[in-house]
Amino acid sequence: MSQSFSFQSFAQNMSMKIEAPVRTHLAKVYSCLAATTAVAAVGAFVHLREIWQAGIMSALVSLGLVLALHFVPYNGKNLQMRLAMLMGFGFFTGNSMGPLLDHVILLNPQIIVTALVGTCVVFVSFTLAALLAHRGQYLFLGGILISILSYMGLFSLLNLFMRSPLVYQGQLYIGLGVMSAFILYDTQAIMEKCRMGSKDIVGHSLDLFFDLVSIFRRLLVILSQKEQRDQQNRRKRN
């Protein structure tokens, strides 16, 4: 009874906080995001099965598709074309992660499952926080997060010469926090854009897909580093 009551209260709370047109738009966005994520998984599988190995071509195609999505805005008539470009971007993004997945599988395949679960937990938690928060509560984060990313980009360039492990680790963990916070911002920004008349399902899905992939990639690296340290410690003990 208590579980049923909790779910009922949650549904009622969502209905009161979010208007029906916005809920409908969010459902379409998350469906599109799920499809893009599934296609990305196919892209990664294609690399792992050595059907199409990730390389410079995958990176260039991925870049070209995301630029096309940016420069060909939604006009109400080109949804199918933009959706095809998003699926292509998802495929080649997943394919481009193939080399990282190869490395992780050599260390411990369980890391991939752990990173997937961790990504889902982070995404769902921050999404619910954004949906249940007061309207526009997290929109102020946009400028702050973009500024942090700008500084991180600068430090990345400097670290090409410094080669500091401390800077690299700092960027890894700060980046994880920043991309998690972007879920809060992007979710509420999508809701506000919808209220202002924007129904760009593909563009809104792309924003969340960037967040999702960035978190997953960073978790893979962090967990891989931990596994490497654990393996080194086991060798020393033996």
Image (spheres, grey):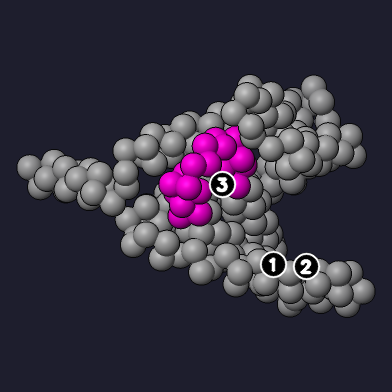
Q: Which residues are magenta?
A: 188-208
Asked if marks 2 and 3 touch (Cβ < 8 Å), the reply is: no
Q: Residue at x 69, y 46 (%)?
A: 104
- Determine whether 157 is above or below 11 in the image: below
Mark 2 or mark 3: which comes first in sequence?
A: 2
Q: CA distance from mark 3 to mark 1?
A: 16 Å
Asked if marks 1 and 2 touch (Cβ < 8 Å), the reply is: yes
Closest to the observer: 213 or 128? 128
**Three-letter code for the amino acid on which mark 2 is drawn:** Gly
Closest to the observer: 222 or 196? 196
Q: Residue 181: x percent and y percent?
A: 52, 63
Quadrant of the image containing the C terminus: bottom right
Dominant secondary-structure state across the stretch colored magenta: helix
Q: Residue 153, which numbered label?
A: 2
**Three-letter code for the amino acid on which mark 1 is drawn:** Leu
Q: Secondary structure at mark 3?
A: helix
